[in-house]
Amino acid sequence: MQTNSSNSNSKTRDSRLEARISNEQKALFQQAAMLSARTLSEFVVSSAQEAATRIIDAHENIRLSREEQMQFVSTLLNPPEPSERLRQADAQYRAKRMTGI
């Protein structure tokens, strides 16, 4: 995660972000910043960036257990026969495609 932070530090900073926080939150953030040898701004920006990266990663990637991976691959290699409903949907799609709709 640190790589992303150092990459963003080398870019021009032309945007500003402001937030209202409680005195307790500010004291907490200042203590954490001091303990990590960063300024308050560096700490807040780095922490927000790391959290954003984790959240986006969690929403953009699918994680499967080993058992789920095996089931997925097995289904891909040996797909079940299409149901009647799927066959009907395919026929409707092909009919629309042939008529140019």
Image (cartoon, grey):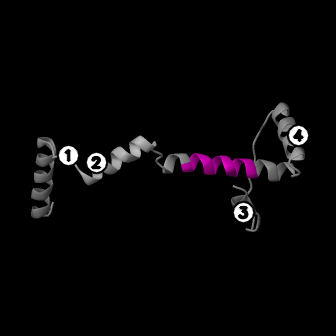
Query: Start and end of the magenta stretch?
Result: 46-57
Disc 3: CA contacts within 10 A as few (<14), some (14-19) or many (>=20): some
Badge 4 element: helix
Can residue 14 be seen in this snapshot?
no
Real-space CA distance between mark 2 and mark 4, rounded to the nearest whole angstrom: 52 Å
Q: Which residue is mark 3?
A: 8
Give the x, y percent position of residue 81: 15, 46
Q: Is residue 83 left or right of residue 76?
A: left
Say whether residue 33 is magenta. no
Q: Which residue is mark 2?
A: 75
Q: Are marks 1 and 2 in contact (CB under 8 Å)?
A: yes
- Residue at image point 70% right, 48% down: 48
Q: Is residue 38 left or right of residue 52?
A: right
What secondary structure is the magenta-colored segment mainly?
A: helix
Real-space CA distance between mark 3 and mark 2, rounded to the nearest whole angstrom: 42 Å
User: Which residue is at the front of the view, 67 or 37?
Assistant: 67
- Residue at image point 14% right, 42% down: 85
Can residue 83 be seen in this snapshot?
yes
Q: Is residue 2 above or below residue 74?
A: below
Real-space CA distance between mark 1 and mark 4, rounded to the nearest whole angstrom: 58 Å
Amino acid, disc 3: Ser
Real-space CA distance between mark 1 and mark 3, rounded to the nearest whole angstrom: 48 Å
Amino acid, disc 1: Pro
Q: Nearer the viewer, mark 1 or mark 3?
A: 1
Q: Which residue is mark 1?
A: 80
Which corner quadrant holds the C terminus? Answer: bottom left
Real-space CA distance between mark 1 and mark 2, rounded to the nearest whole angstrom: 7 Å
Which corner quadrant holds the N terminus? Answer: bottom right
Give the x, y percent position of residue 15: 72, 59
